Image (cartoon, rainbow, N blue to C red):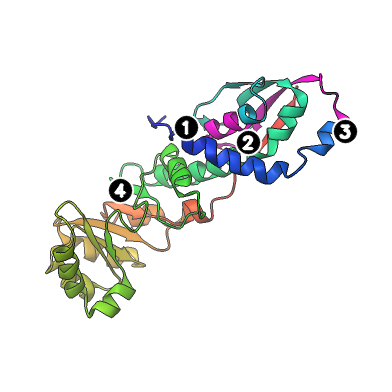
Amino acid sequence: MPDIPPLPSGLVAEAVRVALAEDLGRAGDITSAATIPADRSASAVIAARRPGVVAGMAFAAEAFRQVDPAVRFTVERDDGATLDAGAVLARISGPARAILAAERVALNYLGRLSGIATATAELVTAVAGTGARIVDTRKTTPGLRAIEKYAVRCGGGSNHRFGLDDAVLIKDNHIAVAGGVAVAIRAARAAVGHLVKVEVEVDTLEQLAEAMTASPDAVLLDNMNPAKLREAVALIAGRCIAEASGGVTPATVRAIAETGVDVISSGWITHSAPSLDLGLDMV
């Protein structure tokens, strides 16, 4: 299980606050208020319906805490842990109304983030032994980027840029406006500080050859098949980081990794990963 530094508690608390406000609305959980006596206590577990990797336990715990601090939330599986179907992630006890009111927000965060971690782990497992790292992209849910990128780390992946201000990544539209690959790289290098990395996206070997004349820190090899990727890696010859992107799926990622690239970036692990099927069951 990876050693994963937790997200800042303030970020978790604010994300949960917004989600609870959306779900509880103006009058709170009127169903539970109408059907469950106020003094009724209950116990429950959160369990996995399918195998996967855990991410988001802090969000689940925070949902119950914000609804009612009297709810006791005991973590059974930490973020990054691998689950079998039926595994218990957490045990919950306390006021029944509060448990039911927090249930959906807790499961939404936990299911979504565990789904991302599970998808990431699938790619990481597929490339094991090749030396290639799996990284995410900026194709994240608006407002949830730091949270979803945390889930990638829980699945054993690494993070690409968090935003446009992290590093220079010159893409096809930048090149079109700037007037060429090498021109754009040199302009970027002259404009940013010495600590800022400069990466350029290319989709042909001709563009790659031009890019290497301007000494980028990394090259993103976009939508190249494995044969082209091998040629590109040979041309780069270790002079900068070789990143492959485009068409990355569990079925294709191993072949991509075996070309010798250093990094494989995938938008799929955040924008299309299915939520992990989890449920809250009263005991």
Would you say 202 lies left or right of 1 here?
Answer: left
Left or right of 171 in this view: 90:
right
Residue 66 percent across, percent down from the top left: 62, 30
Q: Which residue is mark 3?
A: 34
Q: Nearer the viewer, mark 3 or mark 4?
A: 3
Q: CA distance from mark 2 to mark 4?
A: 34 Å
Residue tagged by mark 2? 106
Q: Quadrant of residue 37?
A: top right
Of label 2 and label 3, which has the lower sequence position?
Answer: 3
Name the foreground residue: 49 vs 145.
145
Query: Type of residue at label 4?
Result: Ala
Which corner quadrant of the image does residue 6 belong to? Answer: top left
Mark-to-mark CA distance, 3 and 4: 55 Å
Query: Of the residues tagged 2 and 3, which is closer to the observer?
Result: 3
Depth check, mark 2 against mark 1: the one in front is 1
Which circle's residue, 3 or 4, is located before the other in the chain?
A: 3
Tell me the quarter of the image containing the C terminus: top right
Rendered position, 121 above or below 214: above
The residue carrying pointer 3 sits among few (fewer than 14), some (14 to 19) or many (20 or more) residues within 10 Å by Cα, namely: few
The answer for how far apart the CA atoms under marks 3 and 1 are is 33 Å
Q: What residue does disc 1 label?
A: 9
Q: Amino acid at mark 3?
A: Ala
Q: Is residue 157 left or right of residue 12?
A: left
**Distance from the alpha carbon under mark 2 to that under mark 1:** 16 Å
Q: Amino acid at mark 2?
A: Ala
What range of the chain is rendered magenta?
A: 35-63
Marks 2 and 3, Cα distance to the nearest angstrom?
Answer: 22 Å
Question: Up-down: is 192 above or below 38?
Answer: below
On-image quarter of the N terminus? top left
